[in-house]
Amino acid sequence: GDFATDDGTFVCLFGGWGFGPQDDLHMMPVRHLRQAFAGTQQKLLFNPSNIAGDMSPLPAYGQAFTALVDDGAEGGPVKFEDEQVAPPGCTLVLVSGGHLSGGYRRESRSWALLVIAPTGAASWVIPPAAWNEGTLSRPQPRAWHQAVYVAAQFCGPEFPKGCVISMGGNVNQNPSNTIDILDLASWTWAPGMVT
């Protein structure tokens, strides 16, 4: 997957397939891109980045990467922040699902937040609220799906901090039109209704 940090500091590449499912992160400062376009830098290099924390999702390919930022909001980007998850100013990226083995098999229920600080330091986090009596709230297993962040201002009172809607992709090795919704207030997943 690929994404940019919401402050425009880094372009990031994550995971994929390389002798099996990968969970590596490579980052490049956006200023290097600008220098290359201006002709003042010859090579563009994505540098490997260590990710701290032991709450990573399982290595997979076909995952969804969702930056918790609404770039289309009136008045500028709206960034989701939760001080119980990460300090202010960090970019939060939801990484979910994917295939756990080759041949497009074994869809994953795994998920975690990739927290990227303005300095480029990265760590994995699963919010404490996502745990209920030792059990982690999880979506149904899926891969090659889309997941979209919906800011609180566009949600009703049911989602006071917004939500992430995960939809489609492969479920049980078959195309799916089902959805799961992650409530960003309670950090719990629930199946959604398709009408």
Image (cartoon, helix red, strand yellow):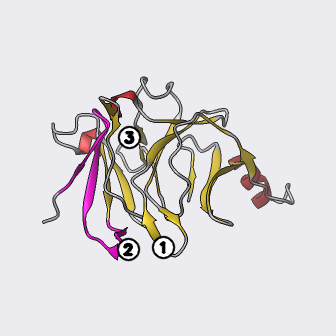
Q: Nearer the viewer, residue 138 or 92?
A: 138
Quarter of the image with the N terminus in it: bottom right
In the rendered image, which residue does mark 2 sit on?
Answer: 173
Q: Which of 33 and 96 is in front in this view?
A: 96
Over which residues does the magenta segment extend? 168-192
Q: Which amino acid does label 1 sit on?
A: Tyr
Q: Which residue lies at the image location 43% right of the left edge and 23% below the top edge? A: 83
Q: Which residue lies at the image location 34% right of the left edge and 70% below the top edge? A: 172
Sequence-wise first label, 3 or 1? 3
Crowding near pointer 2: few (<14 within 10 Å), some, many (20+)? Answer: some
Q: Which amino acid does label 3 sit on?
A: Gly
In the rendered image, which residue does mark 3 sit on?
Answer: 75
| Marks 3 and 1 close (CB-CB < 8 Å) | no
Q: Which amino acid does label 2 sit on?
A: Gln
Residue 26 is situated, as x and y percent measured from the top left of the image, at: 69, 51
Report helix, strand or loop for mark 3: loop
CA separation in Å, label 3 and label 1: 42 Å
11 versus 121 height, above or below: below
